[in-house]
Image (cartoon, helix red, strand yellow):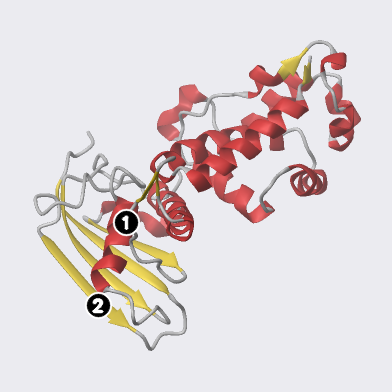
Amino acid sequence: MFLNWQDLIKDINFKHQKCQLDPKNSMAYAYSLGQLLLETKALFYPTEWQSWIKNNCHFSESCAETYLQIAKSWPSFRTQLDAYRKINLSAMENISQMQFVPSELKDNLLENLETELNKIIPPLDNAEDFTTSSPESEKSEKSTIIRLYIPGKVVPKARPRVTTNGTYLPPRYRTWRNQAEVEIYRQVSELNLEVNLPIQKAAISISFCGKHRTNSDLDNLAGACLDALTLNGAGVLQDDRLSCIPKLTIEYIPDTKKTGVWIEIEILSSIINN
């Protein structure tokens, strides 16, 4: 069997676009895209993979690595490439897409795919041994405090724009939300938390560091961070109501070398994993 590379590439770029344009469902698209990239990457040598990303994907290799980390952070990995497999190469309009695939892999893609995937992730029947955290993070894993860092300037929370064509978020804020949610998701997935998400009740401390826009309303800056944390974002918090966040501390520290925001979540109430 062979892959329908044209449809595969089209869907990869479509899911990346949805990550940018659909903040509410961006994490679902990012996870699905990461799964596709994991399987596809297994078909290439490292240098060929870099060339393939550059020639076929509408995003950088570093962005692809972020999607890969999201997919690898969960043991519920399932193969998706079967949907793009074709028995007849004539069904592919652009056979030149195969030029980056090593010739020895073209003869038996299924067999080699399974071999390569086993090197990347453990078998599903050993999912209980799956870990995404390093030994150095053991202290954080057992703590009731989660510390997250989002690099760069925070874009203040914006109200949805209502038009005759529908309701949408301003592009600048939408882009920041997507990037922030991916970063939060990546960091949280590396922790072996002993609580179920979303967190039901927490005390939140937000520290803006570095060169943020000083004419921005503090409540809009904090609102952007909280939106990225809730169920409509990365899914860490249940919501941003008083019943969920009874304590909120915000500070601005301008005299730091790096610009970003530190978020500290002290868990007050959640369901403990058994």
Q: Quadrant of the N terminus?
A: top right
Q: Position of residue 84 (x, y in %)?
A: 69, 20
Circle 2: element type? strand
Q: Amino acid at mark 2?
A: Glu
Q: Which mark is residue 159?
A: 1
- Check contact, mark 2 vs mark 1: CB within 8 A: no
> What residue is shown with label 2?
251
Q: Amino acid at mark 1?
A: Arg
Q: Earlier in the sequence, mark 2 or mark 1?
A: 1
Q: Which residue lies most toward the top here? A: 87
User: Is residue 165 placed above or below 206 in the rendered structure?
Assistant: above
Q: Residues within 10 Å of mark 1 (few under 14, many from 20)?
A: few
Q: Position of residue 251 (x, y in %)?
A: 25, 77
Say which of 6 and 33 sits in front: 6
Q: Position of residue 26 (x, y in %)?
A: 45, 42
Query: Which quarter of the picture shows residue 197?
Result: top left
Q: Would you say 152 lies left or right of 85 here? A: left
Query: Which quarter of the picture shows residue 266?
Result: bottom left
Q: Quadrant of the C terminus?
A: top left
Say which of 111 and 30 sits in front: 30
Residue name at image x 47 percent, y 60 percent: 172
| Residues at marks 2 and 1, CA–CA distance in whole angstroms | 23 Å
Residue name at image x 32 percent, y 60 percent: 225
